[in-house]
Image: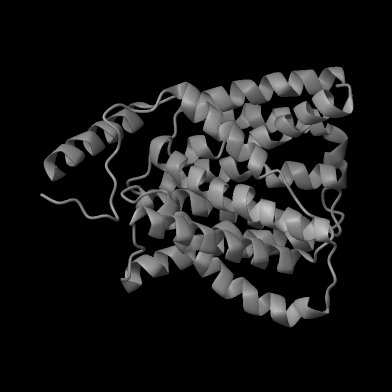
Amino acid sequence: MRINVLETTPNASRPGPATEWALLALLATLWGACVATIPPLTLIASRTLVAGLLLLAVLRLRGVRLPRDAASWRRFMLQACFNSVLPFTLIAWAERSVDAGLATILNSTSPIFIFLLSLGLQGAEKPSLVRLVGVGAGLAGICLIVGFEALGGLGRSLLAQLALVAAAVCYACAATLGRVFRGLDPMVPAAGSLLSGAAVLLPASLIVDRPWTLAPAAESVLAVLALAMFSTALAFTIYFRLIRTLGPMSTSAQAYLRVPIGVAIGVTFLGERLAPNAWLGLACVLIGVTAMTLPTRSSRVGVGLDRRVSKTRT
């Protein structure tokens, strides 16, 4: 029986944990980049459009087509709203009035909301006590690295801080929703959601930023292209692949890894030194991410089912 080109069958054996950890770290690195010389809305819209078109071209070269049914595109649009349109806009607005340290902590709370969502959603992977410990340890590690004094700013810019929490909730919803794309090539939902997001963001950028009046430096334009290729197109493809192989909870561990990776870059290339509490924070993050990415019984059962389905289709 011929397999639909929109559906992919998992490998005969599940990828090793080293591969998944490497992809998780790469995703955290890619999503830690930013460009500060272009207005946030125009930056988001341009990188989303370029990344979506790039993935569309790659899919065409591979002979894979995007779905044409309305139901799939409604799911792509919903995923785009939760994974880019709403959180990117909320974060861009909130970070104008929230200190960087506190913003980092609040942006790292999405695993908590994924944990809470999984408790109430039917059919979702039920979290274990180990996962709960991992979520808590990871967030404690972020606070130790950033500094607990950053929490002293809670309540000062309440609306902006609530916007950052709302962005974290959006990311949690996006990861949970991402389960519906498990039967697709990871590049398909990545391209579909990015193109859907661009359809919303581009008109907003034209109205708010009037990009034709901007004169960005050549370095900024090159940086946007790099963000589109690596931190958006490649990152979203890895994201949907990890949603399929690790699940939403484990994939959300990248929210904790972004800060230690940034610290490691500073230590390695900028000669920065870590305070003792930062070393303890790194240990907590490592413990938390390990606990969150340990395979559960339900995930092993899911992989087994996927294998049996793939055999029946072939």
Residue 280 location, x and y as percent?
Answer: 76, 18
Picture residue at 12% right of the left edge, 41% below the top: 312
51 versus 211 height, above or below? above
Is residue 128 found left or right of 80 in the rendered image? left
Nearer to us in this view, 224 or 136:
224
Residue 284 occupies which quadrant of the picture? top right
140 versus 213 height, above or below? above
Nearer to us in this view, 163 or 251:
251
Residue 287 visible within the image: yes
Picture residue at 51% right of the left edge, 67% below the top: 195
Residue 255 location, x and y as percent?
Answer: 63, 39
The count of marks equals 0
211 versus 289 height, above or below? below
Picture residue at 40% right of the left edge, 36% below the top: 245
Residue 136 location, x and y as percent?
Answer: 62, 30
Residue 139 occupies which quadrant of the picture? top right
Residue 285 location, x and y as percent?
Answer: 66, 26
Nearer to us in this view, 118 or 256:
256
Is residue 270 found left or right of 193 in the rendered image? right
- The image quadrant where one finds the C terminus is top left
Picture residue at 83% right of the left edge, 74% below the top: 214
Is residue 69 found left or right of 163 in the rendered image? left
